[in-house]
């Protein structure tokens, strides 16, 4: 059974890797107007192991996409978030919104989460080198991962967390343990236009899905 105190393991200091990019702010206005163009050239992997460009994940002209960047596939809090996203997928689908979930780790780690949670593999992608995370300037580091006050929010959702990790396996954790210090975030795009962004301040500090629904419902679907 997962307990709040055992949600994560600190990687050895020699395995820590600094992020390539540092960026602050959580609103869409904090990003350059061409962030959609920059992100479109990032290459990640499907959970089946096939390389795919960001620009091929949704219609880059008028398509609406919710892009959820999880921490890593072995993070129990991310299993909880993935569970919530799965439960919301029907609502996204009925609104014409594409759901895209990305995690840190290799495709085989993504498949562990997809099979055991379960989670739809056609919505799940792997970013082992954290390319998208770096482009979006998502937070990284020991303090953010283990000691940020925002992480306390997870205690109010402990029942949901416990349910989500019923079939959890630590084997989903990236082999490159530096990846466990990466924080995630939530983004909404219409084509290449960024409508909403929120960077997780700490582990378990996820964007409220009600906020995401409100943004999606305000945008006319082409």
Image: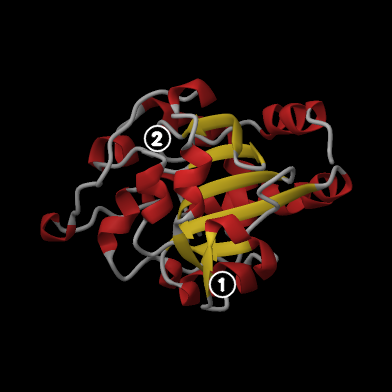
For the residues labelled 1 and 2, say whether their Cβ atoms are less than 8 Å apart: no
Q: Quadrant of residue 213?
A: top right
Label 2 neighbour load within 10 Å: few <14, some 14-19, many 20+: many
**Rounded to the nearest whole Å, what is the CA distance between mark 1 and mark 2?**
25 Å
Residue 126 image offset from top left, x and y in percent: 49, 65
Residue 179 image offset from top left, x and y in percent: 32, 57
Picture layout, residue 151 above or below residue 173: above
Picture layout, residue 84 above or below residue 9: above
> Which of the two residues, 136 or 115, is positioned nearer the viewer here?
136
Which residue is the extreme one toward the right? 94
**Label drawn at residue 47:** 1
Whether residue 5 is visible here, answered yes or no, is no
Q: Quadrant of residue 125?
A: bottom right
Disc 2 marks which residue? 202
Residue at point 74% right, 42% down?
62
Label 1 SS: loop
Residue at point 37% right, 55% down?
131
- Work out whether mark 1 precedes mark 2 in sequence or the reverse, and give the earlier one: 1
Residue at point 57% right, 46% down?
68
Residue 154 image offset from top left, x and y in percent: 51, 36
Label 2 SS: loop
Label 1 neighbour load within 10 Å: few <14, some 14-19, many 20+: many
Q: Is residue 208 left or right of residue 6?
A: right
Residue 23 image offset from top left, x and y in percent: 33, 31
> Which of the two residues, 202 or 186, is positioned nearer the viewer here?
186
**Label drawn at residue 211:** none
Whether residue 123 is visible here, answered yes or no, is yes
State the quadrant of the C terminus. top right
Picture layout, residue 200 above or below residue 124: above
> Which of the two residues, 144 or 103, is positioned nearer the viewer here?
103
Q: Is residue 68 left or right of residue 202?
A: right
Badge count: 2
């Amino acid at each position: 059974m997962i307990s709040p105190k055992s949600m994560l393991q600190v990687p050895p200091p020699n395995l820590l890797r600094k992020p390539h990019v540092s960026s602050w702010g959580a609103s869409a206005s904090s990003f350059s107007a061409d962030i959609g163009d920059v992100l479109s050239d990032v290459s990640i992997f499907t959970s089946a192991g096939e390389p795919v460009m960001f620009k091929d994940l949704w219609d880059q002209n008028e398509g609406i996409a919710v892009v959820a960047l999880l921490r890593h596939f072995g993070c129990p809090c991310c299993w909880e978030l993935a569970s919530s996203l799965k439960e919301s997928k029907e609502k996204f689908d009925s609104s014409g919104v594409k759901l895209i979930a990305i995690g840190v780790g290799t495709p085989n780690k993504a498949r562990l989460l997809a099979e055991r949670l379960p989670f739809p593999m056609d919505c799940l992608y792997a970013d082992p080198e954290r390319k998208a995370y770096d482009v979006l300037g998502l937070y990284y580091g020991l303090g953010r991962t283990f000691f940020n006050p925002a992480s306390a929010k997870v205690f109010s959702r402990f029942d949901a967390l416990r349910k989500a990790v019923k079939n959890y396996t630590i084997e989903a954790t990236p082999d490159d343990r530096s990846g466990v210090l990466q924080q995630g975030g939530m983004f909404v795009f219409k084509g290449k236009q960024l409508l909403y962004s929120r960077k997780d301040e700490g582990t378990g500090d996820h964007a409220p899905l009600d906020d995401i629904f409100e943004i999606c419902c305000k945008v006319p679907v082409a």
